[in-house]
Amino acid sequence: MKLFITVLLSLFSLNAQSAPPSKPAIQQATTYKAVTDISQYWLSEKLDGMRGYWNGTQLLTRQGNLIHSPKWLTKSWPETIMDGELWIKRDHFQQTLSCVRKKRVNEICWQLVRFMIFDLPEHNGTFTERIAAMAQLTKKVNSPYLSMIKQFKLTTIEQLDQTLNNIIKNNGEGLMLHRGNAYYHVGRSTNIMKLKKHQDAEAVVIAYIEGKGKYKGVLGALQVKTIEGIVFKIGSGFSDKERHQPPAIGSLITFKHNGKTNAGIPRFARFFRIREQRAK
């Protein structure tokens, strides 16, 4: 009987170890809307990387998939749950994605990646208090692969516009605004907003449309479907290489646009990049 219980406990232990990690309960930003008092918000650069979630023992994607990183990367990291961005530098999104999504760890490319934390999901304080906690945490850990995104304040909307323009001019993506007295809220929250020069969204590739004229025989446009179920075409923003080797059917792409029509179709939609490739 004792042997049976021992074996049973061992099986439970193995199952617990092999169980996949759960999807992170994360906070998500809304699109920027004009504010009356910008001084109530902390600002940071919106990094062009891949969101990551440290659950205390593992790095996960926002969907809860395991990120295969080198052991030395997270060796000295704390058990504190951290929300952040895996990032190399401005205008290196594809390089970051290529490195992070590999199941077979490429230690050379991982040496360039940093986990830039921007929040502590299980901290009970306001965002201002969480900033202080993040600064203390990164200083204590002192890991070259763990940093905190710089948070700063402005006093006028003119300063906001100037800061955004400077970031865009230097190949940055935009700004994040986070209300200082806000607590961490799982799901969409108006307490945290993203500000860009354009709007972007994601859609799944569902079909190819052949081109005409100089694009005859190659991709003319992608037919895509948004998460809301809107189906439309994207015919611009592609390089010649991408027209010959378009994103696979089923891939998730990011596109830029300028508002929407009354029917909900994005205006002036143009291809930006592949967010999640599907095997052809």
Image (cartoon, rainbow, N blue to C red):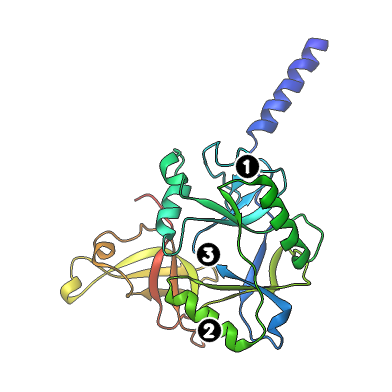
Q: Disc 1 designates what residue?
A: 58
Residue 197 seen: no
Q: Residues within 10 Å of mark 2 (few under 14, many from 20)?
A: few
Q: Residues within 10 Å of mark 3 (few under 14, many from 20)?
A: many
Check disc 1 and give the amino acid type: Gln
Q: Nearer the viewer, residue 218 or 101?
A: 101
> Residue at horizontal 70%, vertical 88%?
36
Q: Nearer the viewer, residue 236 or 97?
A: 97
Q: For numbered disc 3, what is the local secondary structure?
A: loop
In the rendered view, tell whether residue 147 sits above or below residue 218.
above
For the N terminus, give its image quadrant: top right
Q: Which of pointers 1 and 2 lies earlier in the amino acid sequence?
A: 1
In the rendered view, tell whether residue 209 sits above or below residue 124.
below
Residue 69 seen: yes
> Residue at horizontal 49%, vertical 67%?
202
Q: Which of pointers 2 and 3 lies earlier in the amino acid sequence?
A: 3
| In front: label 1 or label 2 | 2
Q: Are marks 2 and 3 in contact (CB under 8 Å)?
A: no
| In front: label 2 or label 3 | 2
Q: Residues within 10 Å of mark 1 (few under 14, many from 20)?
A: some
Percent from the top left, x then y, of residue 99?
A: 44, 48
Check disc 2 and give the amino acid type: Gln
Indicate the quadrant where residue 169 lies. Answer: bottom left
Q: For numbered disc 2, what is the local secondary structure?
A: helix
Q: Which mark is residue 47?
A: 3
Q: Disc 2 designates what residue?
A: 162
Check disc 3 and give the amino acid type: Leu
